Image (cartoon, rainbow, N blue to C red):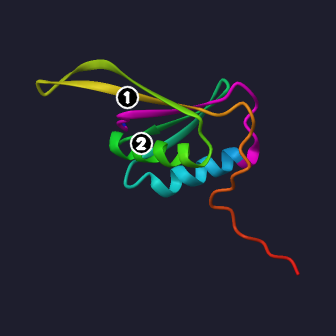
C-alpha cells in the first residue's frame, strides 16, 4: 500500500487547456523530489497524490508562480499510528478564469 501524505488538487471553473495541463505536469515532475506521485482525473481538473507534504508545498509554490491564481490548504485527521496522529493534507490550486499562456518545460522550437 502506498502512502500519500498530501493531495494537490488542480481546479478551474473552465476547461483546462492541454498546454496548461502539460505545463503543470512538467512542474510536478521536476519538483516532486523523491516523493511518490500519482495523477488522477477529477471533476473540473485533476488530483496529484504525493508522499511528502514538503515536496507538495514546494511544487504548489512553483505551480502558482507559473499558472496559478489562488491556493488553499486544509488537513483531515485520519488515525493514530504508533501513538501519533496521522493527517492528510489537501492543497488546492485554483486556476485563473483566463487560461495561462505560460509554457513550462516545453522544448524550444526555432524555425528559420
Q: Which numbered dot is residue 32?
A: none
Marks 1 and 2 sit apart, C-alpha to C-alpha, by 9 Å
Residue at 72% x, 36% y: name it.
16
Q: Quadrant of the N terminus?
A: top left
62 in relation to 39, above or below? below
Q: Which numbered dot is residue 56?
A: 2
Q: Earlier in the sequence, mark 1 or mark 2?
A: 2
**61 vs 51, nearest the viewer:** 61
* Left or right placement of residue 12 versus residue 84 in this view: right
| Secondary structure category for the residue under label 2 | helix
92 in relation to 18, above or below? above
Q: Which residue is mark 1?
A: 89
* Left or right placement of residue 12 versus residue 2 in this view: right
Q: How many marks?
A: 2
* Left or right placement of residue 96 versus residue 73 in this view: right
Residue at 41% x, 42% y: name it.
56
- Magenta residue check for 84: no
| Secondary structure category for the residue under label 1 | strand
Callout 1 touching callout 2 (CB < 8 Å): yes
93 in relation to 26, above or below? above
How packed mark 1 is, by other alpha carbons closer than 10 Å (few <14, some 14-19, many 20 or more), is many
- Residue 79: % across, % down: 25, 19
Residues in magenta?
A: 2-19
- Magenta residue check for 17: yes
Amino acid at each position: 500500500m502506498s502512502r500519500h501524505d498530501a493531495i494537490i488538487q488542480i481546479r478551474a471553473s473552465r476547461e483546462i487547456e492541454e498546454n496548461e495541463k502539460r505545463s503543470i505536469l512538467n512542474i510536478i515532475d521536476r519538483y516532486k523530489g523523491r516523493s511518490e506521485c500519482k495523477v488522477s482525473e477529477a471533476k473540473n481538473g485533476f488530483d496529484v497524490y504525493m508522499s511528502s507534504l514538503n515536496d507538495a508545498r514546494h511544487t504548489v509554490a512553483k505551480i502558482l508562480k507559473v499558472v496559478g491564481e489562488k491556493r488553499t490548504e486544509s488537513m483531515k485527521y485520519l488515525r493514530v499510528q504508533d501513538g501519533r496522529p496521522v493527517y492528510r493534507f489537501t492543497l488546492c490550486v485554483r486556476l485563473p478564469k483566463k487560461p495561462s499562456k505560460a509554457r513550462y518545460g516545453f522544448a524550444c522550437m526555432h524555425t528559420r
